[in-house]
Image (cartoon, grey):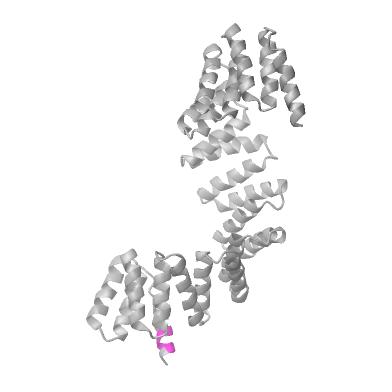
Amino acid sequence: MGEGGKNMSTAIGDDMGFEDEDELVNKGNAFAEMNNFKEALECYDKALSMNSKSTTAWYYKGVALGKMGLIKEEIESYEEVIKLDHNAEYAWYNKGVAFLTLDNFEEALRCFEVVLLLNPEAMDVWYNKGNILFKQGQLEEALKCFDKVTIKVKDNLDVWKQKGQILISLERFEDAIKAYKQALKIDRYNEEVLQNMGNAYVTLGMLKEAVKCYDDILQSNQNLETVWYNKGNALRMSGYVEEALLCYDRAIGLNSNNENAVYNKGLLLGTIGDYRGALVHFERAIEINPKSKEAWLNRGITLQIMNRLSLAIECYDKALRMDPNLAMGWFSKAVALDALGKFDEAANCYNMAMDVSPYLDYTVMDKQMKYFEEYKT
């Protein structure tokens, strides 16, 4: 194949003496199809030396420059096309895409707006415009773009996926699930769609449906730690403790540094009274991320339940240094100080807890005191 490409290139090059503008552009395109962009540019430049107003030569020169990663020069070529023909839709569109490559969203958007004035039915432009608006946080406007696209385009997976993401950002979870179902008609076992749909179901409290999504992914790929982790969360919230623990174990087995899986397994072990197991996992979570205030807090709570009060207070202090507004930290420290007979310090901590969160549900914290009393006896 290499020799064939070489011979083809030579054959094209041998005929370069033919000075016809259209022929030169065609030969440049032939070079470009073989990824010989330097030779292609030579053809386009020669054509332009013959006719500097050739919009076709300027356009294909821009395309070749873009393929070479010379984006600014690419844009300059499209601007030459536009100077000659302000209604050159294809040049405006490619110029917008080039600006997207440079993350210049404002200029890209301006180009796409011109294209839509010229051709309101350009669905790929509505798609790109919607993506830009989404990145800019203009969610409602982005959704309008995708609504236009999905009226005309029913079989594009990326369109439905992106529409689903916008709806998730708008917290319209039911509508997001509808979009993801449309995506699954195109690709029944798409991992990203099933993952996002499962997460949306979790947010809605539809945990059985969420687990079904995660299981559909795991049927074809058992090595996705995030899916095992998310399935574990859904099962934990459903009350299936043993099944959730197994899922966390699978996630940790795939990535021993999965902080969230380690931490959540610790929480779950604590709820079933396995405080030693919980402590091991909170300590491992801290080893992975020493700045996890949640892990320090729950390590302290677990140590307190085990009547290791001084160590518990040290954990609360670490968590509170990270977040002085951590009401649970102040309350838990107050309970520990109270148990040590340090009543003045305990009162100060109780007051701090109330100051930072006067409306917190302290019944959750009262359960902690109950566990503490039970463990001591």
- Residue, x 62% and y 41% (percent of image)? 159
Quadrant position of the N terminus in the picture: top right
Quadrant position of the C terminus in the picture: bottom left
* Left or right, residue 224 beside residue 137: right
**How far from the left and from the top, in percent, is residue 167?**
55, 47
- Location of residue 347 with respect to 288 vertically, above or below: below
Queried whether the magenta region covers residue 373, the answer comes back as yes
* Left or right, residue 301 beside residue 263: left
* Left or right, residue 220 beside residue 132: right
- Location of residue 270 with respect to 60 vertically, above or below: below
Query: From which residue to which does the magenta span run?
Result: 371-375
- Does the rendering let one see residue 323? no
- Does the rendering let one see residue 277? yes
- The residue sitting at the left extreme is 344
Queried whether the magenta region covers residue 274, the answer comes back as no
- Residue, x 39% and y 81% (percent of image)? 304
- Location of residue 117 with respect to 290 vertically, above or below: above
**How far from the left and from the top, in percent, is residue 322?**
34, 64
**Quarter of the figure with residue 48:** top right
- Residue, x 51% and y 18% (percent of image)? 79
**How far from the left and from the top, in percent, is residue 144?**
55, 37
